Image (spheres, rainbow, N blue to C red):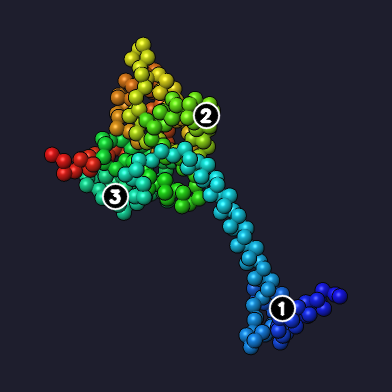
Amino acid sequence: MSLKNSMDEIRKRMGIEVVGEATCGECGKTFEITRRHDVVSDHCPHCLIKEEDDRLKQSLQDQQHNRHVRKYERYCSIPDDIIGKTFDDYTPHTSSQKQARAISERFVTGDMQEHSLVFQGSTGIGKSHLSYCIKQAFNEQGKTVIFIDTPEMMNRIKQSFGNYGDNYQEQLLKAMKNTDLLILDDIGAEYVKPDANGYESWAADIIFQIVNSRLGKQSIYTTNYTSKDLAKKYGMLSKRIISRMMSKAKVIKVDGEDQRLKGFE
């Protein structure tokens, strides 16, 4: 039995009747118009198959992309109090905070000459909040982001030979190098036992490896420290660290009161 005869037999069994032909206005192909139980079907099967094929391809691409994003998400360390926050949740209380929000929103659109940001200011004024909002916006654009708290990062690396695996540090630094956007939060807040000269050389070496690997790539750094404070902390590597952080970066100095302490006397 030929394919046509087989199709005719199947239609007969299902009560489907061919009532005409039409030419699809989309693909230009001719197809049969059918009727079953007084319901006429005049949809182009060629286009329906293509639409389903495109849907499946897009679904596969989305799954692959989500796996790719999750590969970087597992390295994130985000403060609980900012998870789920948006730009609308950020209420500026000073002119510098208002400017910080405006620059952050511009950074998301790519409407800036600088490709990196450095948020500098005291605690509780929204540096991490705005950085997190940028992360979410980049993720929505299909880009990979690592947002990592510097003290937590150092703790993880210290423990890497125990809980995280022997090659955790290598994997982490590679991921931080390759992600579309790196947000290194609270630089300088980590504590590492000083060396004989009073500098936190081990931490400085890790920080330098990270910022050096990010040259020419989009990065965001937040810190409560001034350049002099970082120089005291990181010693000989401090100038090189600061130089890498500042490369093609917009410095945003934010002031104001710690909103976490609001109402506390």
Q: Earlier in the sequence, mark 2 or mark 1?
A: 1
Residue 90's tag is 3
The residue tagged with tag 1: helix, strand or loop?
strand
Q: Which residue is mark 2?
A: 165
Residue in view at x 47 percent, y 42 percent = 73
36 on left or right of 65: right
Residue 143's tag is none
In the rendered image, the vertical position of residue 20 relative to residue 228, given as above or below: below
Q: Nearer the viewer, residue 133 or 238?
A: 133
Is residue 212 visible in the rendered structure shown here? no
Q: Earlier in the sequence, mark 3 or mark 2?
A: 3
Residue 106 in the image: state x and y as whole percent. Answer: 38, 49
In the rendered image, the vertical position of residue 12 relative to residue 138, given as above or below: below
Mark 2 and mark 1: span between their CA atoms?
A: 60 Å
Residue 263 in the image: state x and y as whole percent. Answer: 16, 44
264 on left or right of 201: left
Q: In terms of image quadrants, where is residue 77? A: top left
Q: Which residue is mark 1?
A: 31
